[in-house]
Amino acid sequence: MSPDPVYTLADLESWSRPAPSLAVLGHPIDHSLSPPMHNAALAAEASSGRHPADWRYFRFDIPPSDLPRALTQLQARRFRGVNLTVPHKVMAFDLVKEIDFQARICGAVNTLLLTPVGWHGYNTDGYGLAAAVGENFGRELAGATILLLGAGGAARGAAVECLSRRCASLWIANRTREHLDRLLVFLRPMAGGIPMRALDDSAAPPEGAIVVNATSAGLRPGEPSPIDLSLLPQPAAVMDMIYNPARTALLAQAERLGVPAANGMSMLAHQGAKSLEIWTGIPAERSAPVMLAAGRAALEQPT
Ligand code: NDP
């Protein structure tokens, strides 16, 4: 998909690049769009003379057992920043020196900044979701009725963002009821009076909800949608966090019903742009369109 090489812990142990480096760690990592997206944004800034031209972003395949060693090595090699993806977002929580408030309540970090005292952890996924909803639907999470599908890590981050931005109400549906109940218990203390409900046979959100799919149902081509939209009062918009495939069964149904719909590429670009802002100060609003175009182009390349 992307021509960027995949590095390993062994490469990191002998890393000698003197110029500022950034990295994404995951396992697997070969399908990550982050290197082409970040390198495109860095190149755009460099070509306009706004940022030094020698910054680069690399990807590393790091199994979970190697994460502590990898973070120590990245610090020793003076990497400026790191993105974490599956399966490291929760595990890294206990390995960093300081944690930003938003990441703390999500219980997961996706962005690390090297500071004089060590790694500082952030979570930019919630920002990415809010920015993508604004960009695609011209809507704010504040004041909106949200129907969230899923109860895993991405759903938890999305729910925290919706509540902290004061959505009007939050409905949650999930395949495994026990996981959904656990998420509701976790969220209850931060709801601050915002109504929260499980979607079930006895109740559904009113017309005009923003549906956010934070399940992995649809990641495999041809996989069925996690919900039948025709059984709900007409939603205002449907955002699927999945971006590959670009058109899931959920998005296809939304289009058939005439509901504005968007996949997760915009969210990915915005959360990435926010990470880059944390590391470099380059405004996220400026990098996001460059990252979006680079991500789409990388997806279109033959694997
Ligand atoms: P988790 O593994 O933590 O959670 C997976 C969730 O999906 C659970 O709620 C699980 O339900 C549900 N699920 C899995 N398979 C099915 C199925 N066949 N039918 C219905 N529900 C299902 O994953 P994450 O929360 O980390 O990620 C979820 C999705 O969000 C992924 O597709 C990921 O790529 C995407 N994502 C996109 C981002 C972006 O920037 N665009 C950022 C972060 C995530 P159960 O509890 O029953 O197991």
Image: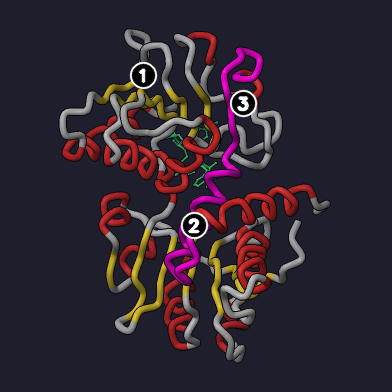
Name above or below for residue 207 compared with residue 133.
above
Check disc 3 and give the amino acid type: Leu
Q: CA distance from mark 1 to mark 3?
A: 20 Å
Check disc 2 and give the amino acid type: Ala
Residue drawn at x 62%, y 55% as measured from the top left? 291
Q: Is label 1 in a helix, a strand or a loop?
A: loop
Q: CA distance from mark 3 to mark 2?
A: 27 Å
In the image, the segment drawn in magenta is 254-283
Q: Position of residue 208 (x, y in %)?
A: 43, 16
Q: Is 278 situated left or right of 28 in this image? A: left
Q: Is label 2 in a helix, a strand or a loop?
A: helix
User: What residue is shown with label 3?
Assistant: 251
Query: Which quarter shows the C terminus?
Result: bottom right
Q: Position of residue 20 (x, y in %)?
A: 55, 82
Q: Residue 86: tell me if it is visible.
A: no
Q: Residue 199 — which label?
A: 1
Q: Is residue 181 magenta?
A: no
Q: Residue 63: tell me if it is visible.
A: yes
Residue drawn at x 47%, y 62% as measured from the top left? 275
Crowd class of label 3 (few under 14; some 14 to 19; many from 20; radius 10 Å): many
Name above or below for residue 116 compared with residue 251.
below
Q: Position of residue 103 (x, y in %)?
A: 32, 56
Q: Is label 3 in a helix, a strand or a loop?
A: helix
Q: Position of residue 48 (x, y in %)?
A: 64, 70
Check disc 1 and give the amino acid type: Leu
**Residue sitting nearer the eye, 229 or 288:** 288
Q: Residue 284 — which label?
A: 2
